[in-house]
Image (cartoon, helix red, strand yellow):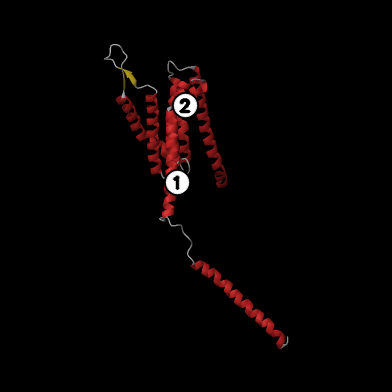
Amino acid sequence: MSWPAAVPAAVARAWLVSVRRRLQVVPRLRRTIPPYRVNETSPHRKVVLVRASFSRLTLVLSFSVAVGVLGPLLGPVGGQVSQVAADTLSAGWAYAAVAYAAGMAGTTKRGAAVLGVVSLWVCVSAYYVTKAAQGDYTKADLGDPTGKTEYFAFGELMSMIGLWGVVACFLGPVCAIAGKTSLSGPYRLVAQLLLPLVVVAETTMRLGHPAPLQNQLVVTMWQVTRIVAIAAVVALCVMALWKRRPSVSHAG
């Protein structure tokens, strides 16, 4: 190759070498730049967290009030559907489900326990206040021989709310933490089985000792509810075993 023809080739090689050096510098610069991190203490972040917590609390309280109010309200409406709905919402496992759902809305187990207690307090208060508005705590004054004088038994109302409020302090955290644990973790299946097992226990107790005024519709409702709860227990166990099957077969 002659000298004039070798000049462009040398220039081209020099340009390629410079480009390669620049490309090698770029990754170094990228490694030296710190990654972007969200400032957890920023005012905007705090506002977002407060709004999310307020939304969860509003949802839990609304659900608790709805369960507590609809139970006594649907009873006097009449009809088979309203009677079944009223008995279902007034059952003990329905209140356990309220605390269970409240726990699922919690961000931590401690927060779930607090939500479980608060939700049951609100639910019980809404139930008895509704019963009082329906006249269940309006008593006749025995001091009046005519029997026309009535009074409101405020002490009896508050005693019932206080009694079930104390019960809520013990059962609320248990159901709520179970609801929180049912979302993830090694004890997820145990937590998921808690609510249907409560349903099975309560329905079995009610069917074993039926009330004198309990009609056939209510008996059928408890029987169907128990069957659904047992089916839920079996389904949860089968699903858990099915999820573990690939790992067991792979280990074998």
103 is higher (above) or lower (below) than 219: below
The residue under the point 66% across, 79% down is: 12
Q: Which mark is residue 163?
A: none
Q: Nearer the viewer, residue 144 or 142?
A: 144
Is the N terminus in the top left, top right, bottom left or bottom right quadrant?
A: bottom right
Q: How many marks?
A: 2
Mark 1 = which residue? 52
The residue under the point 55% across, 70% down is: 26
Q: Is residue 90 visible?
A: no
Going by the numbered disc 2, the residue's amino acid type is Thr
Residue 150 location (% of width, % of height): 32, 18
193 is higher (above) or lower (below) than 248: above
Distance from disc 1 to disc 2, alpha carbons, whole Å, reads 31 Å
Residue 81 location (% of width, % of height): 52, 23
Q: Nearer the viewer, residue 46 or 134?
A: 134
Going by the numbered disc 1, the residue's amino acid type is Ala
